[in-house]
Image (cartoon, rainbow, N blue to C red):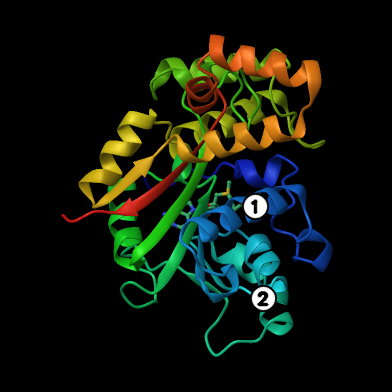
Amino acid sequence: MELTSSLPKFRECSGDRKYRDLSPVDLQTEDNLNLWRHLENLAQISGREITSLRVLDFGCGRGEFVGYLRSKGVQAFGVEIDEKLIASGAMLETMYPDSVPLLSLVGSDGKVGFPDGYFDIIVANQVFEHVAQLDGVAAELYRLLGTQGCLLTLFPARFRLIEPHYHLALVHWLPKGALQQAMIRLLVRLGFGVPPPGNMSRQMMGRVIAEYAQCETFYRSNKQIGGLCSARGIELDFRLIPQQMLSKKLERLSGLKRLAYVGLAKLLPLIALRNNFKTCAAVGRKHRL
Ligand SMILES: C[S@@+](CC[C@H](N)C(=O)[O-])C[C@H]1O[C@@H](n2cnc3c(N)ncnc32)[C@H](O)[C@@H]1O
């Protein structure tokens, strides 16, 4: 959807530091370490050394994870639709020079400048919820993935209680439109959600967030996302990553704590709860269209 309004952008009002120039300290984060662990598991499953794989970070922002992967010797690249973010990640091009740019722009036709089947792993971390035309993106991911390649996608679950960008409860469950807009504006005026910057009224911040919800977030159920990807040739497995995380958690626990957690896992559908009410992490593989 085109953004036609002259309101300030939510990202610029929310204290998000992503438009600041990237620096080496931004690479060594807990988030990157967690993503790295998922990638190591996927490489292990495919029986390959992670450093022998080509990785694309789709919707890479300033390229924090691309830089992290490069620091581990992985041939990683990132693509983005936001030119300003690519400019903020310019440091990477001097830190890890390559024959092609590490970070590049997705074309206005949604195409990415890499050949068919070029990547072994594509990561789309916290991106799908920002994509209006997910079927177009899924088609491009299909084109870019090698036959044995896999997609790792993580996104906030549709039924999370608190929306993770603007921090309001439940309003993202509502359909887009007048009611959602009015609820957001009201809650922000009442003092909920991400506070406005010093020079902005709550009323204005409510409008900024309402527009962001309308034009820049697109919550879909896992079933819808699975269906859209499948129609474009990528079959998503929603259980693999949470299962691995559960086993890793159990490995770390001992004694009574372990027993209690095993009991809890038997009683509650922990994986389904995580997938639907927290963060969904799915692994996609190509199938024949
Ligand atoms: C919440 S940020 C996540 C950035 C990064 N993946 C991370 O984990 O820090 C979502 C990013 O996806 C990008 N994005 C949204 N739609 C996209 C698309 N169709 N193609 C490529 N990038 C996209 C946005 O510009 C934004 O930088």
> Where does label 1 land, which residue?
37
Residue drawn at point x = 29 percent, y = 65 percent: 143
Image quarter (top left, top right, bottom left or bottom right) of the C terminus: bottom left
Which amino acid, mark 2? Gly
> Where does label 2 land, which residue?
73
**Would residue 17 be found to the left or right of residue 42 on screen?**
right
Residue 133, can we see it?
A: no
Residue nearer the viewer, 156 or 188: 156
Q: Secondary structure at mark 1?
A: helix
Whether residues under marks 1 and 2 lie with C-beta atoms below 8 angstroms apart, the answer is no
Which amino acid, mark 1? Arg
Image quarter (top left, top right, bottom left or bottom right) of the N terminus: top left
- For mark 2, does the 10 Å Cα neighbourhood hold few (<14), some (14 to 19), or many (20 or more) residues? few
Residue drawn at point x = 43 percent, y = 31 percent: 219
Q: Secondary structure at mark 2?
A: loop
User: x, y (%) of residue 157?
Assistant: 50, 29
The numbered disc on residue 132 is none
User: x, y (%) of residue 91?
Assistant: 73, 76
Residue drawn at point x = 66 percent, y = 37 percent: 248
User: x, y (%) of residue 195?
Assistant: 75, 28
- For mark 1, does the 10 Å Cα neighbourhood hold few (<14), some (14 to 19), or many (20 or more) residues? few
